[in-house]
Amino acid sequence: MSRTPLDTVEHAAATPDVELPWAELGLKKDEYERVVEILGRRPTGAELAMYSVMWSEHCSYKSSKVHLRQFGEKAPQSDALLVGIGENAGVVDVGQGYAVTFKVESHNHPSYVEPYQGAATGVGGIVRDIIAMGARPVAVVDPLRFGAADHPDTKRVLPGVVAGIGGYGNCLGLPNIGGEVVFDACYQGNPLVNAGAIGVMRHEDIHLAKASGAGNKVVLYGARTGGDGIGGASILASETFDDAKPSKRPAVQVGDPFQEKLLIECTLEAFKEKLVVGIQDLGAAGLSCATSELASNGSGGMRVTLDDVPLRDSTLSPEEILMSESQERMCAVVEPEKVARFLEICEKWDVIATVIGEVTDGDRLEIYWHGGKIVDVDPRTVAHEGPVYERPYARPDWQDALQADDANKLSRPATSEELKSQVLKLVGSPNQASKKWITSQYDHFVQGNTVLAQPEDSGMIRVDEESGLGVAIATDGNGRYAKLDPYTGAQLALAEAYRNVATTGAKPLAVSDCLNFGSPEDPAVMWQFAEAVRGLADGCLQLGTPVTGGNVSLYNQTGEAAIHPTPVVAVLGVIDDVARRTPVAFQEDGQLLYLLGDTREEFGGSAWSQVIHDHLGGLPPKVDLERERLLGEILISASRDGMIDSAHDLSDGGLIQAVVESALLGGKGARLVVPDGLDAFTFLFSESAGRAVVAVPRSEEVRFNDMCGARGLPVTRIGVVDGDAVEIQGEFALSLNELRELHEGTIPALLA
Amino acid sequence: MTARIGVVTFPGSLDDRDTRRAIRLAGAEPVALWHKDKNLHQVDAVVLPGGFSYGDYLRAGAISRFSPVMETVIEQAKAGLPVLGICNGFQVLTEAHLLPGGMLGNDHLHFICRDQKLRVENADTSWTSDYTAGQEIHIPLKNMDGRYVADSYTLDKLEAEGRVAFRYVDFNPNGSLRDIAGITNEAGNVVGLMPHPEHAVEPLIGTGRTDGLPFFTSILKKLVNV
């Protein structure tokens, strides 16, 4: 039926001189030669397809691996960690027999090419990672970065991305409880669409991606396999966008959230009946990844009959079937006597399920097509023994000049009037403005366990209805800080996410990250990456929060221009009783406002320097992780003992931004006094880390001050919750109405 | 002795578990019903929950309306079985012609999720008797296809017969005609609305209000004759 003979293993061995399109599939010459060396012959077309996708940057982490090892080497001792790096997602013990799995991933490149589907399938992929661990997904978060808010292409990309996230997540029944939206011209051709998800399970329900037990069946279930996303992983995620090359549109996958919802329910039902030995979702690199990872993590080999894969398009070649990234598919390893029940559950949920192979005694992954053996490999060489690069890296020669361009020397407002107008400009700037227009397109309420959702400092989900046990998650990143100093920038992202979790009253437990950078082939970018990883690993060690997994996205650059180095850090925390959570909104007139931490003249990378001076230079704020930990302890104790009624962390935009947000959310104003030793400008705009503003009921004033004093945390009384304006005494007052109009009007005006 | 209230799970139902929780919090016994099963298992009332049944790739609710369970629900609703349709459930009820009119995509073309203010227009149905007519309540709303439409004859008839059960106040979130958020059938046993009362039943969760709980206490009182 085919024009050429089937490229079986025998055929490959007999025809060593056949030229294969390894370069078109993204392999370098030395990588191809290594494949030949491993196999002792040229690969078949199908084998080449598998190696090329699995050895792509996206799947193999070949440029980042040598650095990422630090997350393991420097991992702090943590009793909470149940499953660490290397599985589909990390798992953390949150007490009372519950475990939580969470992870953040990138879907940057597809979302630029096709915003709706790129973002939608990003949600789909991360949710399948969570299900594959045995957990019920309970929430999603979406850290997003776009080009300039007023750039015409942002109006193409952003609404599509937001609709895609909403369209997929809402249809899955997952509340969207957090994330970020940041605008910066550096992301114009490379928007960052990161997606995070949390799942909850009992300890005994943890499942791993491995195929063990000879004779066990390999069941492929979910959507049929089609031609979408072929080569997506190897081509889309691993090459820089370049106008000269042909359009890559067809490589983006198309999502079907309804199918994924069925997949969630039927997988959880199969778990409940203990029908699953091992499980893996099909994401990047599709069946190539699932079969090689399941086989290489297990004790035996695997034999697969590709003819049995249900197809959407019957003309697909075996190579295409192996590379297809059709969404909403999973692969389970099931004992033979349980297969019938597994298939019955799939049928109940109208999910197509097919036995496509079995676990074997040997250590080979063998794949058959039309009776011929087209793959015969050691699965470990595909999944785990890909190339590892020690990419050269060097501190860029412009770094010194950038750091010398001190933001503290920028001209500051000279009068109260000028100060006031700069506050208005800041509050109404796209990065500081309310993101309600975006987040109102996401369902926050579904599942009925949402305690806090954006714009709160962290999202919070109730885990147990009886005890009130809950988990919180915050994601943060600041590419401007990281550009000025990647080591510090990564630690500031960690510090902010840690602080955001503690601000709501939850104890930070563990970290996941999504590391977004430019091309690893550029030594300057590689240096940024190496520094950021080192900073994050050192920081996690110091804070006692292990990295449980994450994702690296490289090649986020157009031509020579890389994005700002953008490590996005997610911190997961636990709270014993969600009734004790602390919200951002001011609750009651008359409550006292305290500023916790030290305020210094730190404006490098600040929102003020960007909005007022369009400037990026100098050094980012100093990081003091011991201080962050102390601040966290105070915030958590104060929440548990009912000493504070609202709290908000200080980060980009400084104190004024935080106070305006708390005031607008609570519908209550504030009167602030500039503390001794600070000028009004520094008081309002400084972005010193390790700070928060809290509102303390008068009855708790003494107790709260005593606690801070005893533990050595600087605490400054700065004012009181009151009225319907934000007033800085002796400077200016801004009515809540005026602030609200500005804060909430900006984004719809630009994007609606 | 309490009432048994069934909650149907269609493929793609999302708020079925939440609705069962709300029923439990109100003091009734929730019973899970399955779309392929015609048997209603002797429940005293049925809730069709929110979600995207069958993905709603066709008109919302258009496929679910033909599922086996709906055959029995339609038959018994006509005989007086209390039925509440929330969001997607409301869409299913209009597709099943248990309630008049239909739902189109939101006029602004976006999904919308917000804490919505409503006015209770009819407090005499099986599902609203614990409210008072004219009472203003806040209930979360979240939908893509929430724009209620009907011809003007039907709308006039609904108004004249007092069958507009809920109206949006201050802000019409989806372009629904005459700000209609929910309606009832003539007998008052079948009620449908777009907002989600099951997401406003606990003080700590969601918007932190409990304005939705009376839906479930209303039906409980009716069924156990308190």
Image (cartoon, rainbow, N blue to C red):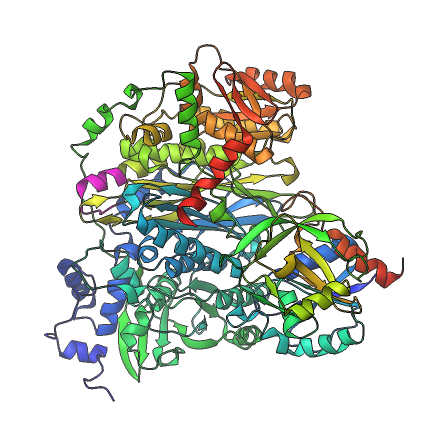
Q: In this rendering, is residue A43 above or below A68? A: below
In the displayed structure, does residue A314 sit left or right of residue A705? left
Q: In the displayed orientation, state which residue is furthest to the left.
A: A17
Q: In this rendering, is residue A527 above or below B172? A: above
Q: How many marks?
A: 0
Q: In the displayed orientation, state which residue is furthest to the right.
A: B226
> Magenta segment range?
A518-529
In the displayed structure, does residue A399 sit left or right of residue B205? left
Which quadrant: the N terminus of chain A?
bottom left
Residue B31: in sight, yes or no?
no
The foreground one among A641 and A179 is A179
Where residue A614 sits: x, y (%)? 29, 32
Where residue A68 sits: x, y (%)? 31, 44
Residue pictured at 43% horizontal, 45% vertical: A749
- Specify the quadrant of the image occupied by residue A57: bottom left
In the displayed structure, does residue A590 sit left or right of residue A515? right
Residue pictured at 41% horizontal, 60% vertical: A121
Q: Is residue A350 magenta?
A: no
Where residue A152 sits: x, y (%)? 31, 50
The foreground one among B107 and A5 is B107
The foreground one among B144 and A479 is B144
Q: In this rendering, is residue A712 above or below B192? A: above
Q: Is residue A526 magenta?
A: yes
- Specify the quadrant of the image occupied by residue A487: top left
